[in-house]
Image: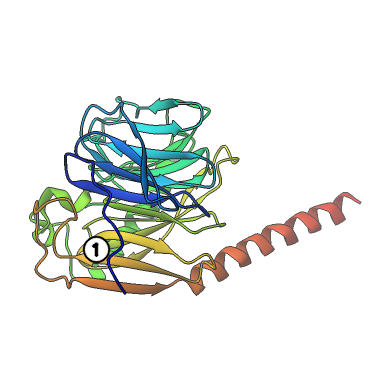
């Protein structure tokens, strides 16, 4: 093991790194409001991308020569490198359940679909074909209630998601009545990490509220483009997430403090990497699909 090189150029703290899948093309984002492109194959600087009006908090890339970034300026930007252009996306500002629209993390579901997490506990799914999110769940992380659901969902659906979150928090002895939220304060709701299993539609988001939320992302489905699944118990700030391509487990990088600043501290958490097995989640999804297929076959038999 030896030191290889340093890529110098950012004028502020580097807040995110990601590789374009299957290549040596590296993207970095920073508090200096820029994205920089590097070639690891040539060990060289390539280009700088400008556009964000505030510090960048997260970045991700897929197979195509593109990357997506989120910022405290409340925007998601998709950068088309070859075309030297960018798409700008902003959340709807008329949600009375939301308080802070700054975005903290992003993960690519596909080259033209992204899942993002915001500072106020909201999670959204976006498409390159629409300027507003396909689906948003507000207060899904944190301690606030009720949970805001997309327009095509019923309020009862939000109550089910809320009950699941509260049960997970109670299993860790975290209570809504605790106004300091285990020492995390307001930032317990900040969604600081997101991940998508490579080649799967399984997503995960993490905050400092004691839960890792699992999602099923199917952008082609109008009513269930983003569907909340189980929540996993995890004390502390979930500052990083990675899902195995098999969908059998995920890794969570956990800290007593959030990754970008000492805004809060959960003294009951332990710094480290935690593995959560997801076999039961995959098995349940498979059984649901089997049930739907059997229902369809029964309907066909009845039609005959």
Whether residue 169 is visible to the viewer of this picture, yes or no, is yes
Whether residue 172 is visible to the viewer of this picture, yes or no, is no
Q: Position of residue 272 (x, y in %)?
A: 23, 72
Number of marks in the image? 1
| 68 versus 290 height, above or below | above
Question: In which image quadrant can residue 277 be found?
Answer: bottom left
Q: Position of residue 134 (x, y in %)?
A: 47, 34
Q: What is the basis of the colouring in this image?
A: rainbow
Q: Residues within 10 Å of mark 1 (few under 14, many from 20)?
A: many
Question: In which image quadrant can residue 85 be found?
Answer: top left
| 217 versus 69 height, above or below | below
188 sits to left or right of 118? left
Residue under numbered circle 1 = 210
231 sits to left or right of 172? right
Question: In which image quadrant can residue 251 be found?
Answer: bottom left
Kind of element beneath mark 1: loop
């Amino acid at each position: 093991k030896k030191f290889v090189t340093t890529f110098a150029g950012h004028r502020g703290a580097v807040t995110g790194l990601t590789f374009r899948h299957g290549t040596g093309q590296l993207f970095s984002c920073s508090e200096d409001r820029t994205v920089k492109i590097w070639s690891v194959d040539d060990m060289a600087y390539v280009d700088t991308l400008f556009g964000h009006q505030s510090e960048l908090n997260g970045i991700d890339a897929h197979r195509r020569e593109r990357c997506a970034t989120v910022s405290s300026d409340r925007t998601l930007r998709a950068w088309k490198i070859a075309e030297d252009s960018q798409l700008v996306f902003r959340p709807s500002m008329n949600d009375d359940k939301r308080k802070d629209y700054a975005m903290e993390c992003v993960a690519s579901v596909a080259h033209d679909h992204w899942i993002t997490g915001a500072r106020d506990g909201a999670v959204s799914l976006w498409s390159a074909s629409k300027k507003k999110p396909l689906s948003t769940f507000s207060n899904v992380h944190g301690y606030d209630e009720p949970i805001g659901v997309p327009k095509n969902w019923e309020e009862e659906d939000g109550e089910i998601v809320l009950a699941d979150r509260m049960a997970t928090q109670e299993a860790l002895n975290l209570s809504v009545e605790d106004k300091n939220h285990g020492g995390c304060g307001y930032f317990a709701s900040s969604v600081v990490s997101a991940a998508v299993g490579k080649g799967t539609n399984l997503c995960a988001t993490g905050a400092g509220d004691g839960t890792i939320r699992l999602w099923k992302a199917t952008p082609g489905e109008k009513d269930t483009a983003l569907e909340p699944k189980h929540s996993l118990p995890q004390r502390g700030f979930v500052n990083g997430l990675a899902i195995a391509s098999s969908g059998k487990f995920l890794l969570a990088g956990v800290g007593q403090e959030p990754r970008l600043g000492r805004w809060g501290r959960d003294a009951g958490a332990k710094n480290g990497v935690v593995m959560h097995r997801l076999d039961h989640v995959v098995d349940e999804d498979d059984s649901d699909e089997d049930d739907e297929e059997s229902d369809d076959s029964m309907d066909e038999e009845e039609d005959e």
